[in-house]
Protein backbone atom coordinates (compact mmCIF):
# COMPACT_ATOMS: atom_id res chain seq x y z
CA UNK A 1 0.00 0.00 0.00
CA UNK A 2 1.41 3.36 -1.02
CA UNK A 3 0.58 6.47 0.98
CA UNK A 4 1.47 9.81 -0.59
CA UNK A 5 1.43 12.82 1.71
CA UNK A 6 -0.56 15.63 0.15
CA UNK A 7 -0.56 18.09 3.05
CA UNK A 8 -2.37 18.65 6.36
CA UNK A 9 -4.89 15.78 6.77
CA UNK A 10 -4.73 14.89 3.12
CA UNK A 11 -3.21 11.79 1.57
CA UNK A 12 -3.56 9.62 -1.45
CA UNK A 13 -3.70 5.88 -0.84
CA UNK A 14 -2.77 3.67 -3.78
CA UNK A 15 -3.27 -0.07 -4.02
CA UNK A 16 -3.49 -2.40 -6.99
CA UNK A 17 -7.25 -2.50 -6.37
CA UNK A 18 -7.72 1.24 -6.59
CA UNK A 19 -6.75 4.62 -5.21
CA UNK A 20 -8.38 6.82 -2.56
CA UNK A 21 -7.80 10.54 -2.20
CA UNK A 22 -8.52 11.80 1.32
CA UNK A 23 -9.33 15.34 2.48
CA UNK A 24 -7.53 17.33 -0.22
CA UNK A 25 -7.21 20.87 1.14
CA UNK A 26 -5.29 23.58 -0.71
CA UNK A 27 -7.23 26.86 -0.64
CA UNK A 28 -7.21 29.00 2.50
CA UNK A 29 -10.00 28.32 4.96
CA UNK A 30 -11.92 30.32 7.58
CA UNK A 31 -11.75 33.87 6.28
CA UNK A 32 -8.34 33.21 4.71
CA UNK A 33 -6.82 32.51 8.13
CA UNK A 34 -5.63 28.93 7.73
CA UNK A 35 -3.32 27.67 5.00
CA UNK A 36 -1.97 24.13 4.68
CA UNK A 37 1.49 23.72 6.20
CA UNK A 38 3.81 22.75 4.59
CA UNK A 39 2.59 24.34 1.38
CA UNK A 40 0.96 21.77 -0.90
CA UNK A 41 -0.31 24.06 -3.63
CA UNK A 42 2.54 23.21 -6.00
CA UNK A 43 1.85 19.46 -6.09
CA UNK A 44 0.65 17.95 -9.34
CA UNK A 45 -3.03 18.05 -8.39
CA UNK A 46 -4.17 17.32 -11.94
CA UNK A 47 -2.84 13.78 -11.61
CA UNK A 48 -3.39 13.38 -7.86
CA UNK A 49 -7.07 14.09 -8.47
CA UNK A 50 -7.46 11.24 -10.94
CA UNK A 51 -8.58 8.62 -8.44
CA UNK A 52 -11.06 5.82 -8.06
CA UNK A 53 -12.39 6.90 -4.68
CA UNK A 54 -12.66 10.14 -2.76
CA UNK A 55 -13.08 10.34 1.00
CA UNK A 56 -13.60 13.54 2.96
CA UNK A 57 -13.77 12.95 6.68
CA UNK A 58 -16.04 15.91 7.52
CA UNK A 59 -17.18 19.31 6.40
CA UNK A 60 -14.65 21.50 8.16
CA UNK A 61 -13.15 23.69 5.47
CA UNK A 62 -9.60 22.50 6.05
CA UNK A 63 -10.87 19.07 4.95
CA UNK A 64 -13.69 19.84 2.56
CA UNK A 65 -12.20 22.34 0.10
CA UNK A 66 -15.08 22.87 -2.32
CA UNK A 67 -13.09 24.86 -4.88
CA UNK A 68 -10.31 22.30 -5.02
CA UNK A 69 -12.73 19.36 -5.18
CA UNK A 70 -14.58 21.05 -8.02
CA UNK A 71 -11.48 21.96 -10.02
CA UNK A 72 -9.12 19.04 -9.47
CA UNK A 73 -10.86 15.84 -8.42
CA UNK A 74 -12.23 13.49 -11.07
CA UNK A 75 -16.01 13.42 -11.12
CA UNK A 76 -15.71 9.73 -11.98
CA UNK A 77 -14.43 9.11 -8.48
CA UNK A 78 -16.80 7.29 -6.17
CA UNK A 79 -17.31 9.29 -3.00
CA UNK A 80 -17.06 7.19 0.18
CA UNK A 81 -19.63 8.80 2.45
CA UNK A 82 -19.71 8.47 6.24
CA UNK A 83 -23.12 7.76 7.70
CA UNK A 84 -23.81 11.27 8.98
CA UNK A 85 -27.16 12.32 10.43
CA UNK A 86 -27.82 15.02 7.87
CA UNK A 87 -27.43 14.92 4.09
CA UNK A 88 -25.34 18.09 3.98
CA UNK A 89 -22.12 16.42 2.86
CA UNK A 90 -23.74 14.51 0.03
CA UNK A 91 -25.63 17.66 -1.02
CA UNK A 92 -22.38 19.61 -1.14
CA UNK A 93 -20.67 16.92 -3.22
CA UNK A 94 -23.59 16.80 -5.64
CA UNK A 95 -23.48 20.57 -6.02
CA UNK A 96 -19.83 20.20 -7.08
CA UNK A 97 -20.68 17.67 -9.78
CA UNK A 98 -20.02 14.35 -8.05
CA UNK A 99 -22.60 11.70 -8.87
CA UNK A 100 -21.18 8.39 -7.62
CA UNK A 101 -21.59 7.64 -3.94
CA UNK A 102 -20.98 4.74 -1.66
CA UNK A 103 -22.75 5.31 1.64
CA UNK A 104 -20.69 3.29 4.05
CA UNK A 105 -22.82 1.75 6.80
CA UNK A 106 -21.35 2.86 10.09
CA UNK A 107 -18.56 0.66 11.43
CA UNK A 108 -19.16 -2.06 8.86
CA UNK A 109 -16.46 -3.39 6.58
CA UNK A 110 -17.33 -2.85 2.93
CA UNK A 111 -15.58 -4.92 0.29
CA UNK A 112 -14.82 -3.04 -2.91
CA UNK A 113 -13.81 -4.63 -6.23
CA UNK A 114 -10.31 -6.11 -6.30
CA UNK A 115 -10.32 -7.04 -2.63
CA UNK A 116 -9.98 -3.52 -1.28
CA UNK A 117 -11.79 -3.23 2.03
CA UNK A 118 -12.86 -0.08 3.81
CA UNK A 119 -14.68 0.78 7.00
CA UNK A 120 -15.82 4.24 8.08
CA UNK A 121 -16.65 5.22 11.61
CA UNK A 122 -18.89 8.28 11.80
CA UNK A 123 -19.02 10.37 14.97
CA UNK A 124 -22.22 12.29 15.20
CA UNK A 125 -22.49 14.32 18.38
CA UNK A 126 -23.10 18.06 18.01
CA UNK A 127 -19.55 18.62 19.20
CA UNK A 128 -17.95 16.35 16.59
CA UNK A 129 -16.79 18.58 13.79
CA UNK A 130 -19.61 20.40 12.01
CA UNK A 131 -22.14 17.78 13.23
CA UNK A 132 -20.06 14.86 12.16
CA UNK A 133 -16.48 13.72 11.91
CA UNK A 134 -15.16 10.36 10.78
CA UNK A 135 -12.23 7.97 10.35
CA UNK A 136 -11.42 5.67 7.46
CA UNK A 137 -9.95 2.19 7.83
CA UNK A 138 -8.49 0.54 4.73
CA UNK A 139 -7.21 -2.98 4.13
CA UNK A 140 -5.60 -4.44 1.06
CA UNK A 141 -3.56 -7.63 0.79
CA UNK A 142 -3.15 -7.84 4.54
CA UNK A 143 -1.93 -4.26 5.00
CA UNK A 144 -4.18 -2.16 7.21
CA UNK A 145 -4.30 1.59 7.56
CA UNK A 146 -6.33 3.80 9.85
CA UNK A 147 -6.78 7.39 8.79
CA UNK A 148 -8.12 8.65 12.11
CA UNK A 149 -7.69 12.19 10.95
CA UNK A 150 -8.88 14.61 13.64
CA UNK A 151 -11.77 12.42 14.77
CA UNK A 152 -11.94 11.65 18.47
CA UNK A 153 -13.68 8.34 19.03
CA UNK A 154 -14.00 7.24 22.63
CA UNK A 155 -11.71 4.32 21.79
CA UNK A 156 -10.25 2.54 18.78
CA UNK A 157 -11.41 -0.98 19.61
CA UNK A 158 -13.67 -1.22 16.58
CA UNK A 159 -10.57 -0.88 14.38
CA UNK A 160 -8.22 -2.91 16.56
CA UNK A 161 -10.61 -5.85 16.39
CA UNK A 162 -10.10 -6.05 12.63
CA UNK A 163 -6.48 -7.03 13.03
CA UNK A 164 -3.12 -5.40 13.52
CA UNK A 165 -2.90 -1.97 11.91
CA UNK A 166 0.28 -1.09 10.02
CA UNK A 167 -0.23 2.64 9.45
CA UNK A 168 -2.02 4.90 11.94
CA UNK A 169 -2.48 8.49 10.78
CA UNK A 170 -3.80 10.89 13.39
CA UNK A 171 -3.97 14.45 14.62
CA UNK A 172 -1.51 15.70 17.20
CA UNK A 173 -1.58 19.50 16.93
CA UNK A 174 -4.14 22.18 17.76
CA UNK A 175 -7.13 23.22 15.68
CA UNK A 176 -9.02 25.69 17.82
CA UNK A 177 -9.06 29.34 18.87
CA UNK A 178 -8.42 28.69 22.56
CA UNK A 179 -6.72 30.29 24.37
CA UNK A 180 -5.25 32.75 21.89
CA UNK A 181 -8.33 34.86 21.27
CA UNK A 182 -9.23 35.29 24.92
CA UNK A 183 -8.69 38.69 26.48
CA UNK A 184 -6.37 37.48 29.21
CA UNK A 185 -3.00 38.59 30.54
CA UNK A 186 -0.21 37.09 28.43
CA UNK A 187 1.07 34.95 31.32
CA UNK A 188 -2.35 33.32 31.75
CA UNK A 189 -2.64 32.72 28.02
CA UNK A 190 0.76 31.06 27.97
CA UNK A 191 -0.16 28.85 30.93
CA UNK A 192 -3.48 27.79 29.38
CA UNK A 193 -1.82 27.26 26.02
CA UNK A 194 0.84 25.07 27.54
CA UNK A 195 -1.79 23.01 29.31
CA UNK A 196 -3.67 22.63 26.04
CA UNK A 197 -0.54 21.67 24.14
CA UNK A 198 0.30 19.00 26.74
CA UNK A 199 -3.25 17.65 26.64
CA UNK A 200 -3.15 17.37 22.85
CA UNK A 201 -0.03 15.27 23.07
CA UNK A 202 -1.43 13.15 25.92
CA UNK A 203 -4.52 12.37 23.90
CA UNK A 204 -2.38 11.45 20.89
CA UNK A 205 -0.22 9.09 22.98
CA UNK A 206 -3.37 7.49 24.32
CA UNK A 207 -4.73 6.76 20.85
CA UNK A 208 -1.35 5.51 19.64
CA UNK A 209 -1.15 3.21 22.62
CA UNK A 210 -4.70 2.00 22.03
CA UNK A 211 -3.99 0.84 18.51
CA UNK A 212 -0.31 -0.11 18.73
CA UNK A 213 0.13 0.22 14.98
CA UNK A 214 3.47 -0.55 13.32
CA UNK A 215 3.88 3.04 12.13
CA UNK A 216 2.44 6.34 13.30
CA UNK A 217 1.99 9.30 10.96
CA UNK A 218 1.28 12.71 12.52
CA UNK A 219 -1.23 14.48 10.26
CA UNK A 220 -4.11 16.98 10.31
CA UNK A 221 -2.16 19.98 11.39
CA UNK A 222 -0.89 22.40 12.23
CA UNK A 223 -2.22 24.94 9.74
CA UNK A 224 -0.18 28.05 9.12
CA UNK A 225 -1.33 31.65 9.46
CA UNK A 226 -0.07 33.93 6.71
CA UNK A 227 -2.04 37.12 7.30
CA UNK A 228 0.10 39.62 9.18
CA UNK A 229 -2.70 39.98 11.73
CA UNK A 230 -2.43 36.27 12.63
CA UNK A 231 1.27 35.61 12.07
CA UNK A 232 1.88 35.29 15.82
CA UNK A 233 -0.12 32.04 15.90
CA UNK A 234 2.60 30.17 14.01
CA UNK A 235 4.80 28.12 16.32
CA UNK A 236 8.00 29.95 15.39
CA UNK A 237 8.30 32.42 18.24
CA UNK A 238 9.52 30.10 20.99
CA UNK A 239 6.19 30.39 22.82
CA UNK A 240 5.67 27.32 25.00
CA UNK A 241 1.95 28.15 25.10
CA UNK A 242 1.55 27.89 21.33
CA UNK A 243 -1.02 25.18 20.56
CA UNK A 244 0.19 24.54 16.99
CA UNK A 245 3.32 22.39 17.33
CA UNK A 246 4.50 20.93 14.02
CA UNK A 247 5.45 17.43 12.94
CA UNK A 248 9.10 17.81 13.96
CA UNK A 249 7.99 18.75 17.48
CA UNK A 250 5.74 15.70 17.44
CA UNK A 251 8.74 13.49 16.69
CA UNK A 252 10.79 14.88 19.54
CA UNK A 253 7.89 14.73 22.04
CA UNK A 254 7.04 11.24 20.87
CA UNK A 255 10.64 10.17 21.42
CA UNK A 256 10.40 11.41 25.03
CA UNK A 257 7.60 8.90 25.70
CA UNK A 258 9.55 6.14 23.96
CA UNK A 259 7.99 6.43 20.50
CA UNK A 260 10.30 5.26 17.73
CA UNK A 261 7.88 4.46 14.90
CA UNK A 262 6.84 7.97 13.84
CA UNK A 263 6.96 8.89 10.15
CA UNK A 264 6.47 12.45 8.92
CA UNK A 265 4.91 12.94 5.52
CA UNK A 266 5.69 16.19 3.76
CA UNK A 267 3.57 17.06 0.73
CA UNK A 268 5.02 14.75 -1.91
CA UNK A 269 6.51 12.22 0.53
CA UNK A 270 5.74 8.63 -0.40
CA UNK A 271 5.53 5.79 2.11
CA UNK A 272 5.40 2.21 0.91
CA UNK A 273 3.71 0.28 3.71
CA UNK A 274 3.83 -3.50 3.86
CA UNK A 275 3.10 -6.06 6.55
CA UNK A 276 6.85 -6.14 7.15
CA UNK A 277 7.70 -2.45 7.39
CA UNK A 278 7.60 0.92 5.70
CA UNK A 279 10.03 2.80 3.50
CA UNK A 280 9.60 6.48 2.85
CA UNK A 281 11.03 8.92 0.34
CA UNK A 282 10.73 12.69 0.75
CA UNK A 283 10.90 15.58 -1.71
CA UNK A 284 13.43 17.28 0.61
CA UNK A 285 15.12 16.01 3.78
CA UNK A 286 12.59 16.33 6.61
CA UNK A 287 14.97 17.74 9.20
CA UNK A 288 16.31 20.34 6.81
CA UNK A 289 12.80 21.36 5.91
CA UNK A 290 11.80 22.03 9.51
CA UNK A 291 15.10 23.75 10.26
CA UNK A 292 14.10 26.18 7.50
CA UNK A 293 10.52 26.58 8.65
CA UNK A 294 10.59 30.35 9.12
CA UNK A 295 11.98 30.93 5.63
CA UNK A 296 9.34 28.58 4.20
CA UNK A 297 6.55 30.50 5.96
CA UNK A 298 7.94 33.88 4.96
CA UNK A 299 8.20 32.89 1.34
CA UNK A 300 4.66 31.48 1.46
CA UNK A 301 3.37 34.63 3.11
CA UNK A 302 4.63 36.78 0.23
CA UNK A 303 3.28 34.39 -2.39
CA UNK A 304 -0.17 34.14 -0.81
CA UNK A 305 -0.58 37.82 0.06
CA UNK A 306 -2.67 38.63 -3.06
CA UNK A 307 -5.03 35.75 -2.24
CA UNK A 308 -5.58 37.06 1.28
CA UNK A 309 -6.11 40.62 0.02
CA UNK A 310 -8.63 39.47 -2.58
CA UNK A 311 -10.56 37.52 0.05
CA UNK A 312 -10.61 40.44 2.44
CA UNK A 313 -12.02 42.67 -0.28
CA UNK A 314 -15.01 40.33 -0.60
CA UNK A 315 -16.19 40.49 3.03
CA UNK A 316 -17.77 43.95 3.17
CA UNK A 317 -21.50 44.17 2.51
CA UNK A 318 -22.57 47.55 3.89
CA UNK A 319 -26.10 47.00 2.60
CA UNK A 320 -26.65 44.18 5.14
CA UNK A 321 -28.70 45.26 8.16
CA UNK A 322 -26.81 43.11 10.66
CA UNK A 323 -29.20 43.45 13.61
CA UNK A 324 -32.26 42.95 11.42
CA UNK A 325 -30.79 39.92 9.66
CA UNK A 326 -29.55 38.33 12.87
CA UNK A 327 -33.02 38.76 14.33
CA UNK A 328 -34.67 37.27 11.29
CA UNK A 329 -32.41 34.22 11.19
CA UNK A 330 -31.61 33.53 14.81
CA UNK A 331 -34.83 34.30 16.69
CA UNK A 332 -36.86 31.43 15.17
CA UNK A 333 -34.07 29.05 16.19
CA UNK A 334 -33.94 30.48 19.71
CA UNK A 335 -37.66 29.90 19.93
CA UNK A 336 -37.28 26.22 19.06
CA UNK A 337 -34.22 25.59 21.14
CA UNK A 338 -34.68 23.92 24.50
CA UNK A 339 -31.40 22.26 25.41
CA UNK A 340 -28.95 24.56 23.69
CA UNK A 341 -30.67 27.76 24.81
CA UNK A 342 -30.93 26.50 28.38
CA UNK A 343 -27.34 25.30 28.23
CA UNK A 344 -26.07 28.73 27.21
CA UNK A 345 -28.24 30.19 29.95
CA UNK A 346 -27.42 33.88 29.44
CA UNK A 347 -26.95 36.61 26.87
CA UNK A 348 -24.09 36.46 24.37
CA UNK A 349 -22.80 39.77 23.11
CA UNK A 350 -21.26 40.58 19.74
CA UNK A 351 -19.29 43.82 19.52
CA UNK A 352 -18.96 44.69 15.85
CA UNK A 353 -16.19 47.07 14.92
CA UNK A 354 -17.07 49.26 11.95
CA UNK A 355 -14.99 49.88 8.82
CA UNK A 356 -13.36 52.90 10.47
CA UNK A 357 -11.84 50.56 13.06
CA UNK A 358 -13.42 52.47 15.96
CA UNK A 359 -17.21 52.64 15.99
CA UNK A 360 -18.80 49.66 17.68
CA UNK A 361 -22.29 48.24 17.38
CA UNK A 362 -23.21 45.89 20.24
CA UNK A 363 -25.76 43.18 19.59
CA UNK A 364 -26.95 40.63 22.10
CA UNK A 365 -28.27 37.17 21.40
CA UNK A 366 -30.43 36.76 24.46
CA UNK A 367 -30.85 33.04 25.02
CA UNK A 368 -33.18 33.18 28.04
CA UNK A 369 -35.21 36.01 26.49
CA UNK A 370 -35.18 34.29 23.07
CA UNK A 371 -34.45 37.43 21.15
CA UNK A 372 -31.71 39.28 19.31
CA UNK A 373 -31.51 42.94 20.28
CA UNK A 374 -29.17 45.83 20.95
CA UNK A 375 -26.98 45.39 24.01
CA UNK A 376 -28.60 46.91 27.10
CA UNK A 377 -25.74 47.24 29.57
CA UNK A 378 -26.37 43.88 31.15
CA UNK A 379 -23.99 41.15 32.31
CA UNK A 380 -23.34 38.67 29.54
CA UNK A 381 -22.11 35.09 29.52
CA UNK A 382 -19.77 35.58 26.55
CA UNK A 383 -18.59 38.62 24.67
CA UNK A 384 -17.09 38.41 21.19
CA UNK A 385 -15.45 41.31 19.42
CA UNK A 386 -14.80 41.28 15.67
CA UNK A 387 -14.94 43.32 12.50
CA UNK A 388 -18.49 43.98 11.44
CA UNK A 389 -17.63 42.93 7.88
CA UNK A 390 -17.13 39.31 9.03
CA UNK A 391 -20.71 39.08 10.28
CA UNK A 392 -21.97 40.91 7.21
CA UNK A 393 -20.31 38.27 5.08
CA UNK A 394 -21.73 35.36 7.11
CA UNK A 395 -25.20 36.80 6.72
CA UNK A 396 -24.61 37.58 3.05
CA UNK A 397 -23.63 33.99 2.22
CA UNK A 398 -26.26 32.57 4.60
CA UNK A 399 -23.65 30.65 6.62
CA UNK A 400 -25.29 28.09 8.92
CA UNK A 401 -22.12 27.20 10.78
CA UNK A 402 -20.31 30.10 12.41
CA UNK A 403 -17.79 27.74 14.01
CA UNK A 404 -16.76 26.45 10.60
CA UNK A 405 -16.14 30.01 9.41
CA UNK A 406 -15.95 32.75 11.99
CA UNK A 407 -14.67 31.07 15.15
CA UNK A 408 -12.04 28.90 13.50
CA UNK A 409 -10.77 32.01 11.71
CA UNK A 410 -9.41 33.27 15.05
CA UNK A 411 -10.23 36.77 13.74
CA UNK A 412 -11.95 37.83 16.94
CA UNK A 413 -11.32 38.29 20.62
CA UNK A 414 -13.43 36.85 23.40
CA UNK A 415 -14.16 37.22 27.07
CA UNK A 416 -16.45 35.13 29.21
CA UNK A 417 -17.80 34.98 32.71
CA UNK A 418 -17.32 31.59 34.27
CA UNK A 419 -16.41 28.34 32.62
CA UNK A 420 -16.27 27.28 29.02
CA UNK A 421 -19.75 26.67 27.68
CA UNK A 422 -19.94 24.16 24.83
CA UNK A 423 -23.57 25.07 24.15
CA UNK A 424 -22.60 28.53 22.90
CA UNK A 425 -20.54 27.03 20.10
CA UNK A 426 -22.98 24.16 19.50
CA UNK A 427 -25.72 26.73 18.91
CA UNK A 428 -23.70 28.86 16.52
CA UNK A 429 -22.83 25.83 14.42
CA UNK A 430 -26.52 24.96 14.13
CA UNK A 431 -28.01 28.00 12.44
CA UNK A 432 -30.32 25.94 10.29
CA UNK A 433 -33.51 24.10 11.09
CA UNK A 434 -31.99 20.74 10.17
CA UNK A 435 -28.92 21.13 12.33
CA UNK A 436 -30.72 22.62 15.29
CA UNK A 437 -33.31 19.85 15.36
CA UNK A 438 -30.58 17.25 15.21
CA UNK A 439 -28.57 18.81 18.03
CA UNK A 440 -31.65 19.24 20.23
CA UNK A 441 -32.61 15.61 19.65
CA UNK A 442 -29.10 14.45 20.43
CA UNK A 443 -28.97 16.29 23.75
CA UNK A 444 -32.44 15.03 24.59
CA UNK A 445 -31.38 11.43 24.08
CA UNK A 446 -28.05 11.95 25.79
CA UNK A 447 -29.85 13.46 28.74
CA UNK A 448 -32.21 10.57 29.16
CA UNK A 449 -29.69 7.78 28.83
CA UNK A 450 -28.66 6.48 32.19
CA UNK A 451 -25.18 5.35 32.93
CA UNK A 452 -25.20 3.30 36.08
CA UNK A 453 -21.89 1.49 35.76
CA UNK A 454 -19.11 2.56 38.12
CA UNK A 455 -15.39 1.88 38.08
CA UNK A 456 -12.59 2.34 40.56
CA UNK A 457 -9.81 4.79 39.78
CA UNK A 458 -7.24 5.17 42.53
CA UNK A 459 -9.09 5.94 45.75
CA UNK A 460 -12.30 6.80 43.96
CA UNK A 461 -15.33 5.04 42.59
CA UNK A 462 -16.58 7.03 39.59
CA UNK A 463 -19.10 6.52 36.84
CA UNK A 464 -17.54 4.61 33.97
CA UNK A 465 -18.54 7.00 31.20
CA UNK A 466 -17.31 10.58 31.10
CA UNK A 467 -20.17 13.04 31.67
CA UNK A 468 -18.97 15.01 28.66
CA UNK A 469 -19.17 12.69 25.64
CA UNK A 470 -19.14 9.32 27.34
CA UNK A 471 -15.48 8.39 26.93
CA UNK A 472 -14.66 5.21 28.77
CA UNK A 473 -12.89 6.44 31.89
CA UNK A 474 -11.15 3.11 32.38
CA UNK A 475 -9.06 4.23 29.39
CA UNK A 476 -9.19 8.00 29.47
CA UNK A 477 -9.65 8.77 33.17
CA UNK A 478 -6.72 9.81 35.33
CA UNK A 479 -7.13 10.56 39.01
CA UNK A 480 -4.66 12.85 40.66
CA UNK A 481 -5.52 13.49 44.31
CA UNK A 482 -9.12 14.64 44.35
CA UNK A 483 -9.21 15.53 40.70
CA UNK A 484 -10.29 13.43 37.74
CA UNK A 485 -9.11 14.31 34.23
CA UNK A 486 -10.68 12.72 31.17
CA UNK A 487 -7.93 12.77 28.57
CA UNK A 488 -10.21 12.66 25.59
CA UNK A 489 -10.89 16.39 25.69
CA UNK A 490 -9.03 17.17 28.89
CA UNK A 491 -12.05 17.97 31.04
CA UNK A 492 -11.41 18.01 34.79
CA UNK A 493 -13.72 17.16 37.67
CA UNK A 494 -13.54 17.82 41.38
CA UNK A 495 -14.30 14.42 42.83
CA UNK A 496 -15.53 15.34 46.34
CA UNK A 497 -18.23 17.60 44.87
CA UNK A 498 -18.53 15.97 41.44
CA UNK A 499 -18.32 19.42 39.89
CA UNK A 500 -16.91 19.81 36.40
CA UNK A 501 -14.06 22.32 36.55
CA UNK A 502 -13.88 22.78 32.80
CA UNK A 503 -17.42 23.47 31.67
CA UNK A 504 -20.75 24.30 33.24
CA UNK A 505 -22.97 21.33 34.17
CA UNK A 506 -21.67 17.81 33.48
CA UNK A 507 -21.40 16.72 37.11
CA UNK A 508 -19.68 13.38 37.68
CA UNK A 509 -20.92 10.70 40.07
CA UNK A 510 -18.13 9.79 42.47
CA UNK A 511 -17.37 8.66 45.99
CA UNK A 512 -14.35 7.48 47.87
CA UNK A 513 -13.70 3.76 47.78
CA UNK A 514 -14.13 3.51 51.53
CA UNK A 515 -17.15 5.83 51.76
CA UNK A 516 -20.32 4.15 52.89
CA UNK A 517 -22.75 6.24 50.95
CA UNK A 518 -22.07 7.52 47.46
CA UNK A 519 -22.30 11.19 46.63
CA UNK A 520 -25.56 12.19 45.00
CA UNK A 521 -25.95 11.07 41.39
CA UNK A 522 -24.81 13.39 38.63
CA UNK A 523 -26.95 16.41 37.98
CA UNK A 524 -28.46 17.19 34.63
CA UNK A 525 -26.04 17.94 31.82
CA UNK A 526 -27.24 21.48 31.38
S1 LIG B 1 -15.44 12.69 26.68
FE1 LIG B 1 -14.79 14.74 26.47
S2 LIG B 1 -13.62 15.08 28.26
FE2 LIG B 1 -14.37 13.09 28.48
Image: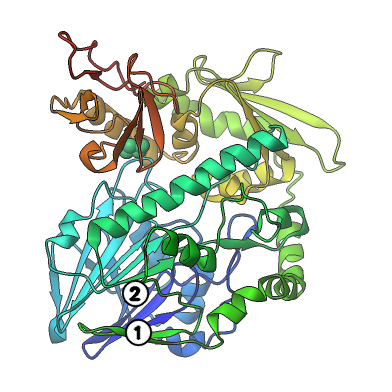
Mark 2: secondary structure: strand
Quarter of the rendered structure image containing ligand 1: top left
Left or right: 23 as drawn, with respect to 373: left
Where residue 54 is drawn, which disc sits there?
Answer: 2
Q: What is the quadrant of the N terminus in the image?
A: bottom left
Horizontal and vertical percent position of residue 426:
44, 36
- Residue pointed to by mark 1: 51
Q: Going 24% across and 23% down the picture, which residue do you hit? A: 460
User: Is there CB contact under 8 Å for labels 1 and 2?
Assistant: yes
- Residue 267 horizontal/vertical position (percent): 51, 79
Whether residue 327 is visible: yes
Badge 2 crowding class, 10 Å Cα cut-off, few under 14, some 14 to 19, many 20 or more, is many
Above or below — where is 522 with respect to 257? above
Which element type, helix, strand or loop, lies under badge 1?
loop
Q: Quadrant of residue 342?
A: top left
- How far from the left and from the top, in percent, is residue 338? 37, 22
Position above or below: 255 against 344: below
Q: How is the image coloured?
A: rainbow
What is the quadrant of residue 364 in the picture?
Answer: top right
Residue at the farthest top position? 517
Residue 455 drawn at (x, y percent)? 16, 30
Instruction: Give whichever of 291, 438 is nearer the camera.
Output: 291
> How many C-alpha atoms fall within 10 Å of the one at disc 1: few (<14), some, or many (≥20)?
many
Amino acid sequence: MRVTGTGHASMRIDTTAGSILCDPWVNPAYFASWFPFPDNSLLDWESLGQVDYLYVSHLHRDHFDAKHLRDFVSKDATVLLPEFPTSEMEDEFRALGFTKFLKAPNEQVVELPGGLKIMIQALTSPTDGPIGDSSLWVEHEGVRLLNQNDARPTDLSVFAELGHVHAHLLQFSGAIWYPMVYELPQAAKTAFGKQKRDRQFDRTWRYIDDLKASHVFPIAGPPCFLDDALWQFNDIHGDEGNIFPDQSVFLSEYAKVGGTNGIVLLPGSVAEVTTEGASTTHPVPVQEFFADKVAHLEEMRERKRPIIEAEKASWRHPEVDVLGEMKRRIEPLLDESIYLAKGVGGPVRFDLVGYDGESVESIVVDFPGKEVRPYADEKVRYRFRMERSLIEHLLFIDEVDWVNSLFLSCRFSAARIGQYNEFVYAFFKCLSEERLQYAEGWYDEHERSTDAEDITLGDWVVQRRCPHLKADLTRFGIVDGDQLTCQLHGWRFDLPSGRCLTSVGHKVRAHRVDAETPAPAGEAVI
